[in-house]
Amino acid sequence: MTAATQPAYGRVIITITLPVFLAIASQTMTAAALPAIGGAMGELARLSWLVIAYMFALTVAGPVYGNLGDMFGRRRVLVSAACIYAIGSFVAILAPTFEWLTVARLIQGIGGGGLMSISQALIGHTVDTRRRGKAQGYVASVGVVASSLGPVIGGGLTAVFGWQSQFVFVLPLAVLAAVMVWRLPVTETGASNRQFDTKGFLLLNAFVGCWVLALEYIKSTTLEGYGIGATLILAGLIMVGMLMRVESRAANPIFPPSLMANSDIARSYALALCHGATLVSFTAFLPLYMQLVWGADIFESSAALLSLTVGLGLGGVLTGNLISRTGRVAIFPAVGSLAAFVLVIVLALFGQGLPLQVLLPMLFFNGLGMGTVMSVVHVTVQQVVPKHLRGAGAGAVTFSRSIGSVLGTAVVTVVLFAAASTQGLDTNLMQVGSPMTSETSRRWAMAFTFAILTIALFAAGGAIAAISSRVKRLDGGDGQAEDAH
């Protein structure tokens, strides 16, 4: 794409960040409304279905949309994803039963996966090389804002207007996103080979389904749950082996073997996986840690989470701008992941005795370090991947991060509650917010030490992947974005 036909930078950023906001906010908005939905439909025991349906669809849809974007053009596929997301939102508004609402969340997740992955791929074709880092920084910060504001928006709308109102809120935004994307002046030419990888798609569904269900069973913290969870993880690994074999023979694979054969791309996917495991598990367990170990009330827990997320957003923006200014990439997640590794270890060993005025800045800098990763991952993949496979490359990044999130949360859950059991704590009787003796708090601190050290290992893995990356700088400092496919 020449400078004359390249869309205005600000227009591209607004157009691309809106779909990302919708995809991420839908996860946290619905989480805030779950109690109200369960009470209204009398389905408290099955509320996790709403989370599983969205998580499953979002994870599977990312690489599939990447493949479809390479085949049919990324702009029209992103518009289709926004329309599917809107349909899911509309079905949710009118859902008469819990089963219908679960189906609606599944449809939303299918659309959300496309909103995430194709938005990232479209940056590579509408933004010149050196400004892609800055664009990815804005996208990363929008993701953090969506995660942070989601519970506030979802909880507020549910309290005032009922749980259906959150789906009313996102419906016009999805339509607006579709219109804005469609109006982007992007040249599109589909791939010559449009044969869809059906076998790969089915195996991918089986693999993700096994691991998502494994997470739910492991969360039960019972011996039977651990056994079923381990069996499902093993079944998922078998599916991975079959998927790799099928992809090596497919005419138009969802996961092109040539991508994984490239060590630079493989390291980027490993970095995304470790980042997802670190960030999501840490964010998920931080409020619980604050209340059980630190003795914090709801306001102090919220302040801790806010410090982390503000650091994440700022880290993404700063990293993106530094990439655009210097052209350097690998140095930022290498330093950031190492810093997060050190700070997480400090929290694990000394967190209980830290005053709030020390803990909050430490969480902020932790978030700042974690926030350096995803902008670099996307920019690196966009540079290394052939332009006709950028959709598949971006989809695989989204997939890697999602799988890391699932696995990281599962592993930390197992470690935490196994350690709690060895400390003589009955997790079935755990009541968050109830007064605890100093001895109970000490035991939870010991259990969380092992859990948080596990998170530190994920951060160390990300640092190793970043340090070993051979892509140190961006090519084509003043190059223009290439024609979109």
Image (cartoon, grey):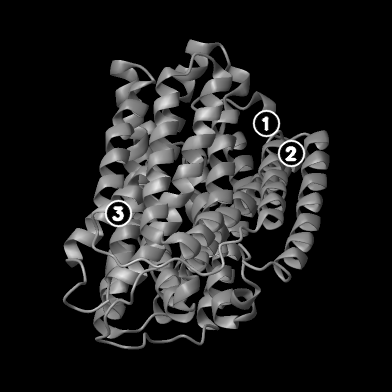
**Vertical placement of 159 versus 466: above or below?**
above
Give the mark nearer the N terminus: 2 vs 3.
3
Q: Quadrant of the N terminus?
A: bottom left
At a point 81% along the width and 50% down the height, the residue shown is 235
The answer to which of 254 and 338 lies nearer the viewer is 254
What is the x, y in percent for residue 361? Answer: 33, 57
Which residue matches tag 3?
Answer: 17
Cβ–Cβ under 8 Å for marks 1 and 2: yes
For residue 117, the mark is: none
Is 479 on the left or on the right of 257, as rendered?
left
Label 1 neighbour load within 10 Å: few <14, some 14-19, many 20+: few
Label 2 neighbour load within 10 Å: few <14, some 14-19, many 20+: some
Which residue matches tag 2?
Answer: 421
Is 344 on the left or on the right of 307, as rendered?
right
At a point 40% along the width and 60% down the height, the residue shown is 74
**Vertical placement of 161 versus 61: above or below?**
above
Q: Between marks 1 and 2, how big is the CA–CA gap?
A: 8 Å
SS under mark 1 = helix
Q: Between marks 2 and 3, how big is the CA–CA gap?
A: 44 Å
SS under mark 2 = helix
Which residue matches tag 1?
Answer: 427
At a point 55% along the width and 83% down the height, the residue shown is 468
Whether residue 170 appears in this view of the structure is yes
Whether residue 291 appears in this view of the structure is no
What is the x, y in percent for residue 285? Answer: 53, 44
Q: Amino acid at mark 3?
A: Thr
Give the mark nearer the N terminus: 1 vs 3.
3
SS under mark 3 = helix
